[in-house]
Amino acid sequence: MSSSTANLVMRSLRKLSILSLVAIALMGGVSYFRASQSAANTSVAMVHKVFPDPATDMPATKVSIVQTAVFAGGCFWGVEAVFEHLKGVSDVVSGYSGGSAETAHYGLVSFGQTGHAESVKITYDPTQITYGQLLKVYFAVAHDPTQLNRQGPDSGTQYRSAIFFANNEEKQVAQAYIDQLNQAHVFQKPIATQIAPLTGFYAAETEHQNFIVNHPNHPYVVIHDLPKLDQLKTKFAALYQ
């Protein structure tokens, strides 16, 4: 890691150590911590009515054929963890989508100039869970789709809300569901999720894979991601594993 990249990472809350957080608190950072907690609460509690099933969906198949879906919704740590806990999902990989292979590196993506968004590639069995059900979890729990180019304390296009479709059927289901949610005023603000063609998915560095499993006590995880898993277990008990 270059010195410039190291400096950038050190400026991110996601890379702060517990001792760093204590130091910030002692210097008056308690208010920021509370603001971050508030943002986390908002991201998993912004829905003010029963969350609807997609009116348009891909039909469940009778033959088990592995499918994939690629979503972006802010920091990939928490989004990955949410989908890893769904029945019918066999694998989730954190990575980058929207830019080129040459710039698919955390140190570059973090500058927000590569076109990439932190994304996850979800491998699922359509006999057990549909694309539309994945979208429902994505919008209801995985992130706040009304935030433009940010999630909580993370800002920049690399943290944008985006659905990367692999075919026209995925595009149509995603657009129909966004229209459905907006028309029903499920959220207090319009959905800002981008729908874009999937031109490539590039796996992130090893240290970003299964991050919450490996670092369950990381301050960022405790504040922003564990509440999502609690919401998933509560709202989607039938799908939770």
Image: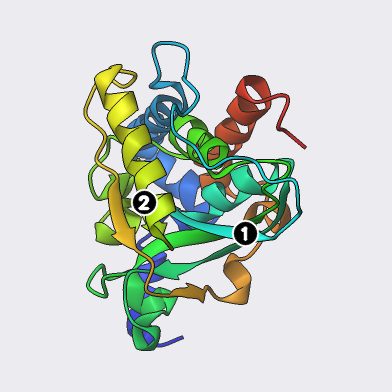
**Residue receiving disc 1:** 67
Query: What whole-number distance in Å separates the C-alpha atoms at marks 2 and 1?
Result: 15 Å
Q: Earlier in the sequence, mark 2 or mark 1?
A: 1
- Residue 7: name its quadrant: bottom left
Tag 1, which secondary structure? strand
Q: Nearer the viewer, residue 25 or 194?
A: 194
Q: How many marks?
A: 2
Percent x, y of residue 72: 41, 54
Q: Nearer the viewer, residue 224 or 17?
A: 224
Q: Residue at x 40, y 88 (%)?
A: 2
Q: Is residue 231 above or below residue 81?
A: above
Tag 2, which secondary structure? helix
Q: Is residue 183 visible?
A: yes
- Residue 28: name its quadrant: top left
Percent x, y of residue 33: 41, 35
Q: Residues within 10 Å of mark 2 (few under 14, many from 20)?
A: some
Q: Residue at x 74, y 46 (%)?
A: 62
**Residue receiving disc 2:** 171
Q: Which mark is residue 31?
A: none
Q: Residue at x 33, y 26 (%)?
A: 180
Residue type for callout 1: Gln
- Residue 46: name its quadrant: top left
Q: Is residue 73 visible?
A: no
In the image, taking residue 186 as reference, residue 218 lies left or right, namely right
In the image, taking residue 237 as reference, residue 96 lies left or right, namely left
